[in-house]
Structures are given as C-alpha cells and as structure tokens.
C-alpha cells in the first residue's frame, strides 16, 4: 500500500531522529591509524548517509584537510583524540560550508589548540559542551520540522486530485525547509566574515 504524504514525511522525520552525534565517551583515548579513523567514522555516522554508497570521511579527504592546514599532521601516522574532534566538526561543516569558510573558522581553532600551550579550555571541553547543546536542541528542531510540515498541508485545495495536492504540499514543505536552511547558512557565513574581520583588526 502506498504511503500518504503525511506518513512518508513522518517516516523520514523518524529516520532523521536516528541520526546521532558521536558521544564524547565513544571517542578512543588512544591514537589511531588512518584506517582506524575512517572505520570509526563510518561506524558511528552511518545513519547520516543518504545512500549506502556515500562515504563519511575518506583517506583522500583527511589527507586534503591536512594538506590545506585544516588539521595538524598526524604524529608518526597516528591521529590523536584532538584530531578526532576536529574531524567530526569537519564532517558536519563540509556539508554546509565552502572550503574557504571552513578554513577561515578552522585556522584559529587549530592554531589555538596545537601550539603546545597550556589552556584552561580543551578541545574535548568544547566538543562536550556542543554535544550537550545539540542533543537538547534535537527535540526542538524535530517539533519545528513537524510544525512546518503541517503548515504546508492543505495549501492547494484547488488541485485537480489528491496526487497533485500531495506533490504541491511536499514542494511547499521543501521550500520552507530550504529557505530556513538558506537563512541559517547566510547567518553562519556572515558570522565567519565578521570573525575574520575582527581578527584582522586586532592585528593592526
């Protein structure tokens, strides 16, 4: 039996709720070789894949991040726990931001935490704080998505049939989500530009 538009969307939302952030407790305390890093990421972020063929992080990606100074080079071909935190952030950023924007926001971060100075806040502290905040927000985000979906239903009572009405309602829902994502992306990009401008001003 074919799913209704509402059943289909609710099924997608339920699957999205299965997407989980990597718990700080799950990140190994030991240094890892490249193969171990990619295996770990694939195992813990499998629910994020759009298709089974999608790759979370490949060796080429990680090598390019290191080459472009997003990541400090591994020590004796091994990646530390701090590398893992940065790679997780990179995974999410690469799906939203341009390479240039990632570099702008990552350079000060890597400079800050890989300069061998003693600091009161560690990368693990930052990751734990963000992890906790994101878990709290997940339920709110899901409720907001459901609210937007319901708002998009019944917008086209004059459609010629139910199939056309379902398609137009789904199109409207996609537009709502896309515009929301666009606004948030604009906000992030402008914050990055402002941060870079502020840092440049300090150097003068």
Image (cartoon, grey):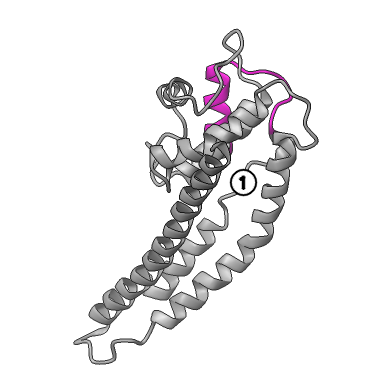
User: Is the residue 81 above or below the residue 132 in the image?
Assistant: above
Q: Residue 54 falls in which quadrant of the image? A: top left
- Residue 32 in sight here: yes
- Residue 1 in sight here: no
Residue at image coords 27%, 82%? 165
User: Is the residue 105 above or below the residue 178 in the image?
Assistant: above
Q: Does dot 1 land on a helix, a strand or a loop?
A: loop
Between 122 and 56, the residue placed more toward the observer is: 122
Q: In the figure, is residue 163 to the left or right of 32?
A: left
User: Is the residue 170 above or below the residue 69 in the image?
Assistant: below
Judge whether residue 105 is colored magenta.
Answer: no
Residue at image coords 37%, 64%? 178
Q: Main secondary structure of the magenta part?
A: helix
Between 58 and 180, the residue placed more toward the observer is: 180
Residue labelled with disc 1 = 21
**Quadrant including the N terminus:** bottom left
Residue density around tag 1, few if under 14, some if 14–19, many if 20 or more, within 10 Å: some
Residue interval drawn in magenta: 27-44
Q: Where is residue 111 drawn, in percent x and y?
A: 60, 28
Q: Where is residue 164 drawn, in percent x and y?
A: 23, 79
Q: In the figure, is residue 172 to the left or right of 116?
A: left
Q: Residue 29 falls in which quadrant of the image? A: top right
- Extreme residue toward the top, this view: 76
Mark count: 1
């Amino acid at each position: 039996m074919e799913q209704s538009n509402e059943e289909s969307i609710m099924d997608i939302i339920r699957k999205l709720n299965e997407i989980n952030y990597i718990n700080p407790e799950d990140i190994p305390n030991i240094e890892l070789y490249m193969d171990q890093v990619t295996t770990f990421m694939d195992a813990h972020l499998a629910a994020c894949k759009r298709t089974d063929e999608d790759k979370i992080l490949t060796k080429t990606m990680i090598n390019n991040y290191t080459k472009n100074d997003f990541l400090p080079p591994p020590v004796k071909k091994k990646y530390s726990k701090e590398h893992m935190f940065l790679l997780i952030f990179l995974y999410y950023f690469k799906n939203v931001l341009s390479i240039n924007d990632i570099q702008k926001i990552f350079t000060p971060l890597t400079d800050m935490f890989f300069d061998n100075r003693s600091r009161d806040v560690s990368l693990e502290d930052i990751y734990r704080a963000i992890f906790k905040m994101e878990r709290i927000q997940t339920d709110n985000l899901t409720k907001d998505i459901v609210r937007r979906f319901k708002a998009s239903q019944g917008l086209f009572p004059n459609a010629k049939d139910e199939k056309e009405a379902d398609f137009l309602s789904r199109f409207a829902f996609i537009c709502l989500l896309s515009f929301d994502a666009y606004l948030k992306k604009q906000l992030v990009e402008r914050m990055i530009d402002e941060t870079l401008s502020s840092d440049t001003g300090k150097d003068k």
